[in-house]
Amino acid sequence: MKPEILKNIFAAAGVFFAAIIALSVLLALVFGRKDAWRPDVAVLSLEGIITDAEAIREQIKEIEEIDSIKAVVVRINTPGGAVAPSQEIHGEIKRLRKTKKVVASMGAIAASGGYYAAVAADRIVANPGTITGSIGVIVEFINAEELLGKLGLKGYVIKSGRFKDSGSPIRKMEDEERRLLQSVVDDINAQFISAVAEGRSLKVEAVKGIADGRIFSGAQAKEKGLVDDLGDLTDAINIGAGMAGIKDKPEVIYTGKTEFEFLELFKNSVARGLNGYFAELFTGMRVMYLTPNFQG
């Protein structure tokens, strides 16, 4: 037999066996063969300063489409971040609870916006030494008027209304502006307090008593009803599996981390080194659920 014919026969056989393997995998997925791996618990990671909710929204959407997953552990390691994304993540977790059991697992820090996300879960697990709490809102400004004067520079503003440049770094803040901004901060803080009270089944007045920005250890948070259990990630996975009625050892799938890309991390490192002030000087006002001194 000619070598060319043999070569063609072997090639055809290879294609045939590859097709058989592909078909077997497909049948396993479609008909749920017992030897096909099917995760029971998903671990979703939320890390870094919260600036956007899109990544975690996409991951939650993918988890919702996997029927075998009965419980989700949201691993939180963040000092918080921008208000609206923190609220969006809170809403996504609440929606996820309609189809899955959700446990929040606190790492080194789950404070401010990180805690806001956690209270949306069915249950919260923290390490005894986790930094958490910091229920509150912060807006930071810098007044560079004197510095500009020493440099021989003067700023000018043309605006459509008297409050349009509130928080401007080139002039002193007026009392009326301060009162206006304080009212915004108070309203957003009330939203935070309401979310904690609802998520933890606490009275609003009880939450107000500790909603002054103070931080707690995980052990202290448990004493105040802000956390359900003390334990690590493995404990949180087992708790979630138990809540979902999984009797055997759970099969766990870990999703990609929801965190900044390299350039975003570098920018935040610089911002931390300057204590955040000069980094915000010309980038506009940001209202934050953030614990400023615990950003790493």
Image (cartoon, helix red, strand yellow):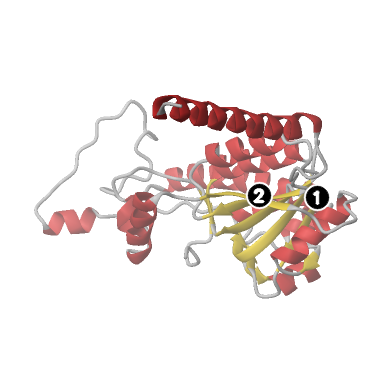
Front residue of this view, candidates 279 and 21: 21
First reached walking from the N terminus: tag 1 or tag 2 = 2
Would residue 80 appear left or right of 196 to someone viewing this image?
left
Q: Residues within 10 Å of mark 2 (few under 14, many from 20)?
A: many
Front residue of this view, candidates 164 and 24: 24
Judging by the rendered image, the residue that carries numbered circle 2 is: 117
Front residue of this view, candidates 43 and 279: 43
Residue placed at 47% from the left, 51% from the top? Answer: 139
User: Is residue 189 in sight in this rendering?
Assistant: yes
- Mark 1 secondary-structure assignment: loop
Q: Position of residue 118 (x, y in %)?
A: 69, 53
* Up/down of 52 relative to 270, above or below: above
* Up/down of 224 relative to 15, above or below: below
Would residue 76 appear left or right of 139 to someone viewing this image?
right
Tags 1 and 2 in contact by the CB under 8 Å rule? no
As measured in the structure, the alpha-carbon distance from the residue carrying label 1 to the one carrying label 2 is: 11 Å
Q: Amino acid at mark 2?
A: Ala
Q: Position of residue 51 (x, y in %)?
A: 48, 45
Looking at the rendered structure, which numbered label has been put on residue 66?
none
Judging by the rendered image, the residue that carries numbered circle 1 is: 122
Q: Position of residue 230 (x, y in %)?
A: 77, 70
- Mark 2 secondary-structure assignment: helix
Q: Residue furthest left?
A: 152
Q: Amino acid at mark 1?
A: Asp
Residue placed at 74% from the left, 45% from the top? Answer: 37
Q: Residues within 10 Å of mark 1 (few under 14, many from 20)?
A: some
Residue placed at 55% from the left, 47% from the top? Answer: 185
Residue placed at 78% from the left, 45% from the top? Answer: 35
Q: Position of residue 29 (x, y in %)?
A: 73, 33
